[in-house]
Image (cartoon, helix red, strand yellow):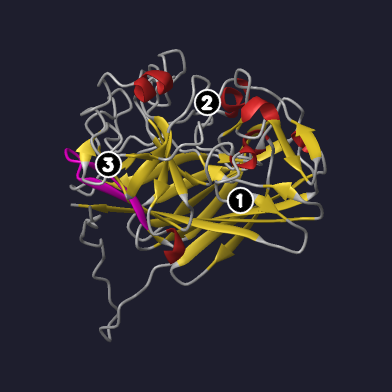
Amino acid sequence: MAFISIQCKEQKKDVSDDMGAEIIKPVTIMKKAYGITPDSIAVDSYTLKNENGMELTVITYGGIITSLKVPNKNQVLEDVVLGYDSLVHYTRKNPYFGAIIGRYGNRIAKGKFSLDNTEYQLATNDGPNNLHGGVKGFDKVVWNATEIKGDSTASLVLTYLSKDMEEGFPGNLETKVIYTLTNNNELEVTYEATTDKKTIVNLTQHSYFNLSGDFSKTILDHEITIDADTFIPVDKTLIPTGELKDVTNTPFDFRVAKTVGQDIEVKDDQLKKGLGYDHCWVLNKQNEGIRLVSTAYHKESGRLLEILSNEPGIQLYTGNFLDGTLPSKQGGTYGFRTGFCLETQHYPDSPNQKDFPSVVLNPGEKYETVTTFKFSVK
């Protein structure tokens, strides 16, 4: 079945000088102190704002996107990502709200993998498995930040040196993540890494979206598409079985837009194991580089999110573990399924699955992936 791209109108301002030439307003960056970590490291926040008013706020702790304000169909700006309103909450209990994930996004079975006949043991911080880099992954470190300003874009460049055997991973990994905001309401995320020893890498971004802008509402009315003919079934601990399963006639078929809630309560063994959607899809057109891989649309607000990436997979997670115990930055708490994640990545447990695309990074090579989150209205 063919995947149909949803076309939408760009938001542009008709601004011109006295000669009739269009004036391009630069994207601005504002820096301010955000807080101090429990181990006395200063954390800053950076707010990027474009000519349409779209506003991105990132903190250096975890590279976390704490706020992302985008217009609705009435040009009202609202925050569309879950998170907290203070550093103390992020450092105490954070289900990866808005964070950079590494060294390895998703799960590694029993926290073990081998390279060149050497076995490495990682923390088992998710039942019997390793999840999202371990006990202190990239979501819990303070990144160095620099600013880059262009004519119609601005970038926040975050860097972090993950030292050899940090969290059990081999090699000194020089990591760079670049958040770029454009005047076309695009947030481009570029991930780069180099190593001095053979290692594994799988970086991603873990924002929880709710395009309604109202975090007291669930995301069950959001329409999702995923350009994938197959998905990756998991066992009871959410580790891939090794099978790639055709989505046809299953609740996992998002090739044509449907709401999250349409099939999420269907009696299905995979949905039961994930308590909903918490699976990786095998994206189509993997040899075509950066392409449209997924969309999310909220009819009431009119907000459309298009995700473009050169990654082979995407994890849809529907906030199944949100249980009303975490404080919302809008007041109250985050309830069941009030946010969804669409995490572009390589597949879970790839180091232990010989038929999955490789996640190995060798000295002299450069890891580089790009994902763009493009917002518009329709």
Q: Please provide percent x and percent y for residue 179.
A: 53, 54
Quadrant of residue 50 within the rendered picture? bottom left
Q: Nearer the viewer, mark 3 or mark 1?
A: 1
- Callout 1 amino acid: Ser
Q: Is residue 319 magenta?
A: no
x then y, percent, for residue 33: 62, 40
176 to the left or right of 52: right
Residue 294 lies left or right of residue 90; in this view the side is: left
Residue for badge 1 = 358
List the residue tagged with mark 2.
95
- The reply to whether callout 3 and callout 1 are in contact (CB within 8 Å) is no
Is residue 135 something that shows in the picture? Answer: no
Q: Which residues are magenta?
A: 292-305
Q: How many marks?
A: 3
Answer whether labels 2 and 3 touch (C-beta < 8 Å): no
Q: Position of residue 60 (x, y in %)?
A: 63, 42
Q: Which residue is mark 3?
A: 254
**Dot 3 or dot 1, earlier in sequence:** 3
Separation (CA) of disc 2 from disc 1: 27 Å
Residue 66 appears anywhere in the view: yes
Which residue is at 49% across, 24% downward? Answer: 235
- Relative horizontal placement of residue 342, taking residue 133 as reference (left or right): left
Q: Residues within 10 Å of mark 3 (few under 14, many from 20)?
A: many
Mark nearer the N terminus (2 vs 1): 2
Q: Amino acid at mark 2?
A: Pro
354 and 266: which one is in front? 354
Q: Secondary structure at mark 1?
A: loop
87 shown above or below 361: above
Amino acid type at image mark 3: Phe
Q: Nearer the viewer, mark 2 or mark 3?
A: 3
